[in-house]
């Protein structure tokens, strides 16, 4: 656990049930992700002192804000927290500069306004200090909210879905500004988002929550491609989750063999699994490799399968297709390729294609009963 930054654990059995443990270091962005009602905003409110829990510990920058075992619970106004709410919570009757200045009561009026102006410049709102919230766009209001949060010289910055109210073009611009801003801050940043792509782009690590429980923490790539369970894999929107059986272990060749859909799949050697054991496995859609329809290659020998395209969806510059591998069992494999690859290989509904499953990308998990068994 870090000596600086944030250290937190929350446990509660009544009202909102919680069993959450996480940490976030200085200069790090931690994304809290999970479906609605998973406890993401509750965690932020607990850090800010706006929500009390039965049992918990919250330490930030070596300051203890909550320790239920020692009856410590620092009041919210005494916690150096910068909080950007989902709806920004700006005062409509105050200008942008005045909205920021309300967090600077420890300074004289002249100093408050001067410092507020410098903070607005930091978030690229120079020249808009006198405008009221209704005269600002959604993205500009968000910047005012960030400047106000920073005015408290916080020990931690909390962002509760700060990009949900703006359009996609503005959102991309704000992403860049947050990435730029974090370089100047030596504090932990907690970002609540329901958007996995957003978490992957902005966060160093993410913590996946579900029903008030932290299921897994790690880098976005780690949690997405190496989930600890099928539940985590599903919540991370992994489409290819299946069951199989370990049929052979070859430690001398560093190979473990699985039986799936009547075929052998080879993966990297997994010593902790036994022959005959049922397991679950997954592979990201991006790591299912399309065989070139006009010219074969050596890579097509790696866990090859054939199937019929039964679903074709274009999203942005990528095409996601669903391939029916085993018709009697209705087993489907999802694959994602760039649009130009789909066009070059003339992918379309009803055609048969070959694919390979990259052995290094196949991840094994403890067995759970799924709708389609191997």
Image: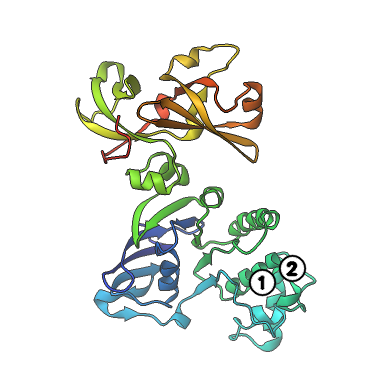
Residue linked to disc 1: 144
Percent across and percent down for residue 221 are 46, 42
Percent across and percent down for residue 302 are 43, 18
N-terminal of the pair, mark 2 or mark 1, is 2
Please identify the quadrant where the N terminus is shown. Answer: bottom left
Give the residue drawn at x 41%, y 69%. Answer: 42
Q: Residue furthest right?
A: 127
Q: Quarter-wise, where is residue 326 in the image?
A: top left
> 152 or 342: nearer the eye?
342
Percent across and percent down for residue 30 are 47, 56
Give the residue drawn at x 49%, y 75%. Answer: 80
- Res 344 seen here: yes
> 364 or 293: nearer the eye?
293
Please identify the quadrant where the C terminus is shown. Answer: top left
Residue linked to disc 2: 125
- Res 61 seen here: no
Q: Residue furthest front?
A: 328
Give the residue drawn at x 68%, y 77%. Answer: 115
Give the residue drawn at x 61%, y 31%. Answer: 338
- Badge 1 density bin: few <14, some 14–19, many ≥20, Cα 10 Å: many
Q: Residue furthest bottom?
A: 109
Q: Quarter-wise, where is residue 134 in the image?
A: bottom right
Confirm or deny contact between disc 2 and disc 1 (CB under 8 A): yes
| Element under disc 2 | loop
> 46 or 27: nearer the eye?
46
The correct choice, above or below, for 352 with respect to 24 in the image is above
> 158 or 4: nearer the eye?
158
| Element under disc 1 | helix
């Amino acid at each position: 656990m870090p000596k600086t930054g944030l250290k937190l654990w929350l446990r509660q059995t009544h009202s909102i049930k919680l069993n959450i443990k996480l940490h976030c270091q200085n200069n790090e962005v931690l994304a809290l992700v999970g479906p609605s009602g998973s406890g993401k905003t509750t965690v932020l409110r607990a850090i800010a002192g706006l929500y009390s829990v039965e049992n918990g510990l919250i330490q930030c920058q070596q300051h203890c804000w909550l320790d239920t075992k020692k009856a410590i619970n620092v009041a919210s106004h005494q916690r150096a927290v910068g909080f950007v709410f989902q709806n920004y919570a700006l005062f409509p009757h105050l200008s942008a500069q005045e909205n920021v200045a309300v967090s600077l009561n420890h300074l004289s009026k002249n100093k408050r306004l001067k410092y507020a102006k410098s903070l607005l410049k930091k978030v690229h709102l120079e020249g808009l200090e006198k405008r009221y919230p209704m005269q600002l766009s959604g993205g500009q209001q968000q910047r005012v909210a960030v400047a106000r949060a920073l005015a408290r010289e916080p020990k931690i910055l909390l962002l509760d879905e700060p990009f949900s109210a703006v359009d996609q073009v503005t959102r991309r611009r704000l992403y860049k500004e947050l990435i730029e801003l974090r370089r100047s801050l030596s504090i932990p940043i907690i970002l609540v988002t329901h958007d996995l792509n957003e978490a992957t782009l902005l966060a160093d690590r993410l913590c996946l929550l579900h029903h008030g429980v932290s299921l897994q923490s790690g880098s976005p790539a780690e949690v997405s491609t190496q989930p600890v369970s099928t539940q985590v894999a599903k919540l991370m929107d992994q489409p290819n989750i299946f069951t199989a059986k370990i049929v052979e272990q070859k430690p001398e060749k560093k190979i473990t063999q699985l039986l799936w859909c009547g075929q052998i799949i080879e993966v990297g050697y997994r010593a902790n699994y036994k022959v005959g054991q049922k397991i679950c496995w997954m592979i990201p859609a991006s790591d299912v490799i399309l065989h070139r329809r006009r010219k074969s290659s050596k890579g097509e020998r790696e866990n090859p399968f054939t199937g019929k395209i039964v679903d074709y969806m274009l999203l942005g510059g990528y095409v996601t297709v669903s391939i029916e591998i085993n018709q009697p069992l209705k087993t489907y494999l999802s694959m994602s390729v760039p649009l130009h690859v789909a066009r070059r290989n003339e992918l379309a509904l009803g055609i048969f294609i070959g694919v390979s499953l990259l052995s290094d990308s196949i991840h094994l998990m403890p067995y759970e009963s799924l709708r389609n068994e191997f």
